[in-house]
Image (spheres, rainbow, N blue to C red):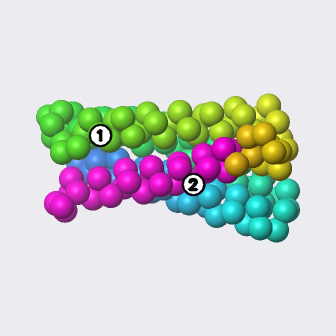
């Protein structure tokens, strides 16, 4: 029982949760961008659906990453982590792009294949991945310097 208590304490008190949670939005936006690219190349609807589901999970995991990042900034850096404001702005922008893509696709399941909005919809996937990568880089700057 002592081991379980120590592990729980380490997860909730000693180790910041943010570094664990940020890997999900980065990986999921990467997978989504890859699937949408493959869907455009092969014209397979199943690949577009995989991209869509990845982007949904990316949005959900981004909420967790943002919340743990804000908590980590307050607890570990007393609200003064390097690039904190830039990361907040990019995190909000990422969420807006993800939610816009999800809502647009929900309204029109064939959006990727349409002449009106298909290119913008695909661009949202690549933009979300680029923003997630940038956020990851800025997090690395906090830990390892520039």
Image check: 17 left or right of 104?
Answer: left
Magenta-span inclusion, residue 121: yes
Mark 2 lies on residue: 126
User: Element at badge 1?
Assistant: helix
Query: Measuring 35% from the left and 47% from the top, which residue is drawn there?
Result: 18
Considering depth in this image, is 100 or 18 the residue closer to the camera? Answer: 100
Q: How many marks?
A: 2
Residue 44 drawn at (x, y percent):
85, 62
Residue 113 visible: yes
Image check: 114 left or right of 87?
Answer: right
Considering depth in this image, is 79 or 103 the residue closer to the camera? Answer: 103
Q: Predominant secondary structure in magenta?
A: helix
Residue 59 drawn at (x, y percent):
56, 41
Mark 1 lies on residue: 86
- Quarter of the image where one finds residue 40: bottom right
User: Element at badge 2?
Assistant: helix
Residue 66, placed above or below residue 31:
above
Query: Measuring 51% from the left and 36% from the top, which residue is drawn there?
Result: 95
Are the two marked residues, 1 and 2, in contact with CB atoms closer than 8 angstroms? no
Q: Which of the two labelled residues, at mark 1 and mark 2, occupies the earlier sequence position? A: 1
Q: Residue furthest front?
A: 115
Q: CA distance from mark 1 to mark 2?
A: 20 Å
For the C terminus, which image quadrant?
Answer: bottom left
Residue 112 drawn at (x, y percent):
78, 48
Query: How many C-alpha atoms fall within 10 Å of the one at disc 2: few (<14), some, or many (≥20)?
Result: some
Magenta highlight range: 120-146
């Amino acid at each position: 029982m002592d081991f379980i208590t120590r592990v729980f304490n380490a997860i909730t008190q000693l180790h910041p949760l943010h570094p664990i949670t940020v890997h999900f939005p980065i990986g999921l936006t990467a997978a989504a961008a890859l699937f949408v690219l493959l869907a455009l190349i092969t014209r397979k609807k199943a690949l577009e659906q995989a991209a869509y589901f990845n982007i949904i999970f990316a949005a959900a995991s981004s909420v967790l990453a943002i919340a743990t990042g804000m908590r980590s900034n307050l607890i570990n850096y007393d609200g003064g982590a390097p690039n904190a404001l830039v990361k907040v702005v990019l995190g909000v922008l990422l969420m807006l792009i993800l939610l816009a893509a999800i809502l647009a696709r929900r309204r029109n399941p064939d959006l990727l294949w349409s002449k009106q909005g298909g290119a913008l919809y695909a661009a949202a996937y690549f933009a979300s991945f680029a923003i997630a990568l940038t956020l990851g880089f800025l997090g690395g700057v906090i830990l390892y310097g520039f």
